[in-house]
Image: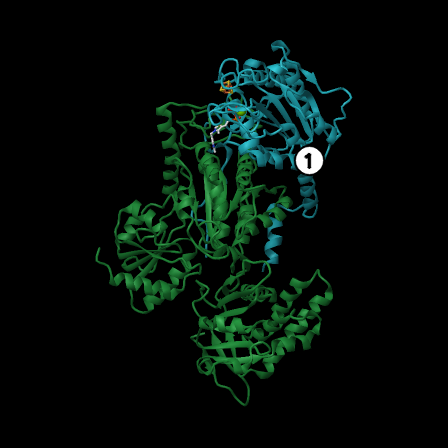
């Protein structure tokens, strides 16, 4: 005979006496959150790093969309860019290198009331996390993934990244990288992402627009943000910055965002390429599919308490 | 069947012997439905208030191959699946020759004489065992028609056994009907025909029959299931509603069951792209407010270690099931081994305390799962549930749990709070407590969960002082848990010559070894340790009362001859009496092996 070694009562919320409940806040009493209210630690990024801009625009988005403070959910892996959650005064998770997407999927699938934003770097997304990128995209998990692509490993101080262009000199390719870089836009389209956008940190309004459209998309939304690493790859995106003599070319108006092949062709050359929404289609989300499975399953046990559902199974095992 | 009390036969009637237990080994090919007969016998025993334990091997190749199912049914306590069989039911030559060695002297061989010819049986075998040849294949075809070829042989054989052991025919009929209803009604009818044909064959030919003494579990409703099922249902009972995993034998059953069942409770189980994604998804769901489960076997557990380290650091409740199999690497996927205790307790870099709980048997899988969830929540920690291939696949009957009382609701509480520091160093109980995203914090200061060393709100720090304090916090909560775990009780007298220390599935065999040794006048006792990490307090007192302490575990003796758990206990207690009884043949313990090894060790004990 077996029993539990330790008699337990179900742990109540107040098991830690420091948790003191307060009254809920009525929607009418809510004001848009200010930058001050949503900023936390001062970013540890190098002065001039492109990531500052992405953070500032996330704050803008929060303010503009009047997000409820407690619902802001920010998840990241590891890298300079992935330190993002510390700088946001909201619920956040700083997970392990490359695995932010499955972590965020766990949140998104178990908590449909939250819209999760995932931030990370190019190494995090396409090297160590490459497989997760593919599968989260194809399953169409409803969340937004913003990759701050600097074409280099920043945090570990200048190694070749999967998006480093051929010829890029890093500490691991002193003579210049020879490997064909990943094209994040093509990668996302092929993997089955249902929203694929591209922007650059030097164009704030455009970054905000992309993040906002991504957030409003019902499905897996991916945004590549070119975000310069001033420390290890300065000038990487000058050719996309009109102030540095480059050109900011928006996705042509006539581009059909539901045409997968057209989107793929448009992504052919990303040096510096186009900016805007490359691809956007509606496909049932993982969240909706799972919800349907739950609805169907629960219809068969309607009116039963959990213990009664379990009892039915046990009765069959007698 | 050693205690058979024979009633003398009268006038051509078969004799009837009263027995209190029997070990029946069924050997054939996996496609013959060997597992199905074993399952029927086990479930029948459960319904007959008898104890039952099974043991099976399934070939790891999908195309089938030799397979066995051993069932031990007893009217009293059954602690292991039995060293030697009383009866061997052999479907083929190879089943006969490969498994005769497991039959006790004087045991019965029931064989299919269509496959094993009487002439092929060596004369010395005939002298040692009782042989009963039955043309099982031909009679099955005769009973149900030839279309199904080998189909139905198993049910025919079940009929043979049913009569031979005077099993409850009504209950078996019902079990057959339950099993085959839903399919074509003809199938159920065919099954019943095959069964009845077998039953009547024995009735007409047998000279000796057996009858179980009434079971001791009178009046108790029993359920019959495998360890993997019990564990999965335990998780559901505990309130777990999210899980994620990646297929691997022998863990897959748990994930398949949860995938099927959880939606009924409003939950879901996700098949992930790999084990790292699986543990990560579960972790995300745990952070989402309700402790979630992931699991795997050896290779997949290796992949999860970095994430488990994150759970230690972030102090995230999480359940990780490790159904151990033979390792390292792909190892022996369908064999039993207890060699993951090191990775369970220490797997990962850094000081990463976690809880490790090892169920002892099928029933224990159910309760340990609930306990694991409660511990994970109460101490905000990852908990590893360490079972093994043996417990995972074997079927046992146990008292039906009081589900109305046990099933718990652990849905997240998202009501707003005034302020909150998850890693509060001055928390009254010293334990971290998370609030889930979606919880409003009136102070406006929100927590972050992280793998970096952090301050009380979860923000990163390089402070040596905080690293010392937080490391201590993560360690001390497990010390608190240790103080709550009851000290295990000794099976047998509290002092003596030999103390056998078991963990996991070695409990039953160790206790049976104690019974046999005691009956033989040897001062053996045993103790079972369920909490591997942290260990319960008070073990040293127990050890002190014995001359020898032998840790019985299914893993290699290692460089220093003490095995994995043995090494942990040695390191903890610095007691040279602690030595190992280890083996790595991929098979469950035989009682005789434990006894002979223990006896040999007591002879060569120069160090005490
Ligand atoms: C498993 C593991 N391997 C390696 C590292 C070291 N590491 C930290 S960040 C990083 C790469 C960061 O590059 P990227 O994702 O592009 O982010 P960036 O710093 O450029 O923003 C590496 C290799 C780690 N933290 N974990
Ligand atoms: S190293 Fe590069 S990516 Fe990292 S903070 Fe500095 S500029 Fe930004
Ligand atoms: Mg980078």
Q: Front-most of A36 and B47?
A: A36
**Letter of the chain that mark 1 sits on in the rendering:** A
Give me the chain that's green. B
Q: Position of residue B383 (x, y in %)?
A: 46, 42
Label 1 Cα neighbours within 10 Å, binned few <14 / some 14-19 / many ≥20: some
- Say which residue appears at 44% left-offset and 63% top-offset: B80
Q: Front-most of B247 and A161?
A: A161
Q: Position of residue B111 (x, y in %)?
A: 55, 76
Q: Quadrant of residue A116?
A: top right
Give me the chain that's cyan. A
User: Which residue in the protein does label 1 denote?
Assistant: A285
Say which quadrant the N terminus of chain B sits in.
bottom left
Q: Position of residue A17 (x, y in %)?
A: 45, 29
Residue projecting furthest to the right: A254
Left or right: where does residue A116 sit relative to residue B486? right
> Tag 1's secondary structure?
loop
Q: Front-most of B508 and B333?
A: B333
Mark 1 lies within 8 Å of ligand 1 (Cβ measured):
no
Q: Quadrant of residue A140?
A: top right
- Say which residue appears at 31% left-offset and 60% top-offset: B493
Q: Position of residue B267 (x, y in %)?
A: 61, 41
Say which quadrant the C terminus of chain B sits in.
bottom left
Residue projecting furthest to the front: A175
Instruction: Say whether residue A106 is visible.
Output: no
């Amino acid at each position: 005979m077996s029993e539990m070694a330790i008699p337990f009562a179900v742990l109540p919320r107040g098991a830690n006496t420091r948790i003191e409940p307060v009254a809920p806040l009525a929607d009418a009493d809510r004001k848009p959150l200010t930058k001050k209210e949503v900023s936390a630690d001062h970013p540890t990024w190098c002065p001039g790093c492109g990531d500052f801009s992405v953070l500032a625009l996330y704050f803008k988005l929060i303010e503009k969309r009047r997000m409820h403070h407690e619902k802001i959910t920010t998840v990241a892996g590891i890298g300079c860019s992935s330190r993002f959650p510390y700088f946001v005064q909201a619920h956040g998770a700083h997970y392990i290198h490359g695995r932010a997407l499955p972590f965020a999927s766990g949140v998104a699938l178990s908590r449909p009331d939250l819209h999760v934003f995932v931030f990370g770097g190019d190494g995090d997304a396409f090297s160590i996390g490459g497989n997760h990128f593919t599968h989260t995209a194809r399953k169409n998990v409803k969340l937004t993934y913003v990759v701050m692509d600097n074409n280099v490993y920043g945090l570990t101080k200048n190694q070749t990244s999967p998006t480093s262009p051929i010829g890029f000199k890093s500490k691991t390719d002193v003579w210049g990288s020879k490997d064909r870089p990943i094209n994040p836009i093509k990668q996302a389209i092929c993997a089955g992402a249902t929203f694929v956008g591209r922007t650059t940190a030097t164009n704030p309004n455009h970054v905000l627009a992309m993040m906002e459209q991504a957030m409003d998309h019902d499905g897996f939304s991916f945004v590549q943000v070119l975000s310069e690493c001033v420390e290890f790859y300065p000038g990487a995106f000058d050719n996309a910055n009109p102030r540095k003599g480059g050109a900011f070319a928006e996705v042509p108006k006539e581009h059909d965002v539901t045409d997968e092949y057209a989107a793929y062709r448009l992504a052919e050359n990303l040096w510096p390429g186009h900016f805007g929404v490359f691809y956007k289609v509606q496909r049932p989300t993982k969240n909706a599919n799972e919800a349907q499975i739950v609805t169907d399953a629960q219809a068969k046990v309607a009116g039963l308490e959990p213990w009664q559902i379990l009892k039915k199974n046990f009765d069959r095992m007698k | 069947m050693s205690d058979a009390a024979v009633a003398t036969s009268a006038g051509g009637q078969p004799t009837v012997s009263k027995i209190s237990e029997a070990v029946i080994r069924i050997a054939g090919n996996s496609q013959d439905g060997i597992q199905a007969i074993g399952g029927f016998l086990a479930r029948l025993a459960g319904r007959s208030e008898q104890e039952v334990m099974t043991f099976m091997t399934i070939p790891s190749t999908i195309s089938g191959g030799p397979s066995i199912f051993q069932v031990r049914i007893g009217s009293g306590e059954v602690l292991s699946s039995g060293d030697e069989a009383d009866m061997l039911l052999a479907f083929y030559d190879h089943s006969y020759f490969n498994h005769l060695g497991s039959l006790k002297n004087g045991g019965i061989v029931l064989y299919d004489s269509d496959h094993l010819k009487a002439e092929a049986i060596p004369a010395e075998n005939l002298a040692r065992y009782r042989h009963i040849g039955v043309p099982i294949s031909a009679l099955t075809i005769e009973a149900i028609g030839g279309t199904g070829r080998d189909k139905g042989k198993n049910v025919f054989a079940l009929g043979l056994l049913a009569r031979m052991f005077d099993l409850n025919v009504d209950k078996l009929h019902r079990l057959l009907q339950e099993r085959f209803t839903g399919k074509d009604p003809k199938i159920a009818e065919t099954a019943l025909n095959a069964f009845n044909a077998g039953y009547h064959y024995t009735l007409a030919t047998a000279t000796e029959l057996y009858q179980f003494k009434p079971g001791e579990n009178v009046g108790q409703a029993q359920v019959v299931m495998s360890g993997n099922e019990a564990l999965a249902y335990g998780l559901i009972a505990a309130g777990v509603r999210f899980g994620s995993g990646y297929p691997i034998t022998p863990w897959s059953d748990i994930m398949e069951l949860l995938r099927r069942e959880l939606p009924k409770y409003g939950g879901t189980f996700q098949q992930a792209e790999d084990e790292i994604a699986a543990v990560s998804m579960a972790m995300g769901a745990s952070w989402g407010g309700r402790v979630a489960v992931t699991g795997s076997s050896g290779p997949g557990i290796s992949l999860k270690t970095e994430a488990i380290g994150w759970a230690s650091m972030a102090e995230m409740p999480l359940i990780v099931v490790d159904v151990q199999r033979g390792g390292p690497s792909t190892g022996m996927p369908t064999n039993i081994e207890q060699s993951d205790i090191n990775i369970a307790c220490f797997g990962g870099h850094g000081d990463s305390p976690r809880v490790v709980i090892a169920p002892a048997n099928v029933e224990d899988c159910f309760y340990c799962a609930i306990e694991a969830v409660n511990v994970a929540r109460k101490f905000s920690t990852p908990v590893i549930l360490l079972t093994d291939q043996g417990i995972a696949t074997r079927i046992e009957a146990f008292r039906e749990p009081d589900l109305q009382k046990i099933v718990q609701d652990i849905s997240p509480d998202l009501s707003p709070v005034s302020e909150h520091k998850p890693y509060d160093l001055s928390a009254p109980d010293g334990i971290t407590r998370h609030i889930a995203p979606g919880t409003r914090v009136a102070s406006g200061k929100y927590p972050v969960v992280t793998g970096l060393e952090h301050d009380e709100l979860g923000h990163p720090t390089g402070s040596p002082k905080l690293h010392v304090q937080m490391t201590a916090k993560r360690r001390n909560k497990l010390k608190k848990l240790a103080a709550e775990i009851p000290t295990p009780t000794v099976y047998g007298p509290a002092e003596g010559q030999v103390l056998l220390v078991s963990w996991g599935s070695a409990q039953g065999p160790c206790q049976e070894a104690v019974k046999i040794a005691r009956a033989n006048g040897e001062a053996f006792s045993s103790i079972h340790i369920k909490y591997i990490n942290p260990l319960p307090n008070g073990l040293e007192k127990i050890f002190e009362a014995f001359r020898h302490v032998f840790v019985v575990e299914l893993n290699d003796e290692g460089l220093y001859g003490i095995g994995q758990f043995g090494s942990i206990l040695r390191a903890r207690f610095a007691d040279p009496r602690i030595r190992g009884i280890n083996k790595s043949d991929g098979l469950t313990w035989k009682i005789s092996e434990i006894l002979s090894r223990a006896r040999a060790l007591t002879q060569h004990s120069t160090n005490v």
